[in-house]
Image: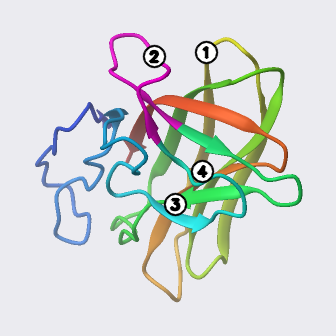
Amino acid sequence: MKYILSALIMLTVSYGWAGEALPFEFSGYLTALSGALPPPWTVYRTPGMAPGWTNQYQFEQSAGVLHLTGSADNPTCIQTKFYPFPDGGGEITFHVYCRSVNEKAKFHLFLLGDDYAWNVNKELTAKPEWVKYTVSGKFPAQYKQNRFWLRIDADKNSDILIGKIEILYTR
């Protein structure tokens, strides 16, 4: 079974995700107050300009985008809240529609969990045009800490825009 989660819709599907509905209420176009992060994203590390939503740029029919800028020395990182691993495993795919503000900009997408024992990540290079970037991973069959989260890092000296996020869970 595949579930695609769309903007601001919480799907209620019984499939054994620790007794909860699919938890990705943030999938789709991003929206927030100017300068804020859309829920459930929070700052993990921000050595440079604080990440936040802006209406200075648009993606498709969105009113604005998420702007992340790494400092000269360190990346700027945002992450979601923690979620329980789904019962019975499965695979998660994390899509981000991203572009650089100027030239090419390096960034990372992460699937993290079990106190970092589960770490699937991909280093990517954003270009000035919008592109869909993806990282996928199978949930671990065994774990000590029943939680996972998603993270996006704008590498040092990188300036990126994120217009849309899609999460796909395959059982």
For badge 4, the amino acid type reads: Gly
- The residue carrying mark 4 is 137
Residue 165, position in %: x, y?
A: 44, 35
Residue 15, position in %: x, y?
A: 20, 55
The CA distance from mark 2 to mark 4 is 27 Å
Viewer-side label of 2, 4? 2
Which circle's residue, 1 or 4, is located before the other in the chain? Answer: 1
Which circle's residue, 2 or 4, is located before the other in the chain? Answer: 2
Front in this rendered view, residue 138 or 42: 42
Disc 3 crowd, CA 10 A, few/some/many (<14, 14-19, 20+)? many
For badge 2, the amino acid type reads: Phe
Quadrant of residue 96 in the image? top right
The CA distance from mark 2 to mark 1 is 8 Å
Which circle's residue, 2 or 1, is located before the other in the chain? Answer: 2
- The residue carrying mark 1 is 130
Front in this rendered view, residue 6 or 79: 79
